[in-house]
Image (cartoon, rainbow, N blue to C red):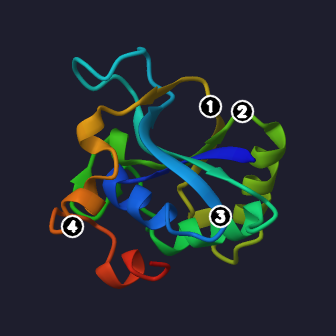
Amino acid sequence: MQTLYFAGGCLWGVQEFMKHLPGVISTEAGRANGKTNTTKGPYDGYAECVKVTFTTEQVSLYQLLSYFFEIIDPYSLNQQGEDIGPKYRTGIYSQDPDHLAIARDFINVQKDAPRIKVEVMPLKNYVKSDDEHQDRLTRFPNDYCHIPQALLNKFK
């Protein structure tokens, strides 16, 4: 099993989409690369993200990245849908340098690579989101989500 962290705007939709993908073992809503080890207090530099544990026996990292790019606007800086601000930036984070190299290669081979605003960085800090954010759209399917419903249902 391997783990990668995806930031794609509001984490509710990212988690709902990613958890149904082939090869995904588990997902967890969280925050990446912030300045504290808590979810309490003011915004602290984190990106909302989803921790995705997967098996490469069923899905390649490259395919997982391709799925992720289906649900984000890769050209938007600090915004996805109606969610605006640095915590809604897009990013791919990992503690494995090979994962980051593959993510950079994935972006660099895109015909529009110079326009892509997705950050690819080592995971420096991760905090699990509070329980109210875990599997939010499974529990409350009518909550706001910037990802179109058809995409959310693609792998269900």
Residue 149 lies, in percent from the top left, at 30, 79
| Residue 10 appears in the figure | no
Side (left or right) of 49 relative to 81: right
Chain-order first, disc 1 or disc 4: 1
Residue wearing tag 1: 123
Camera-nearest label, 3 or 4: 4
Q: Is residue 45 above or below residue 20?
A: above
Q: What residue type is labelled 1?
A: Leu
Rounded to the nearest angstrom, the CA distance separating label 4 from label 2 is 32 Å
- Choose the circle earlier in sequence order: 4 or 2: 2
Q: What element carries label 1?
A: loop
Q: Three-letter amino acid code at disc 2?
A: Gln
Is there a contact, CB below 8 Å, between mark 2 and mark 1?
A: yes
Q: Residue 141 carries which label?
A: 4
Going by the numbered disc 4, the residue's amino acid type is Pro
In the rendering, which numbered label is found on residue 69? none
Instruction: List x then y, in percent, for residue 92.
Output: 60, 48
Q: Which residue lies at the image location 54% right of the left edge and 23% below the top edge?
A: 125
- Tag 4–tag 2 contact (CB < 8 Å): no
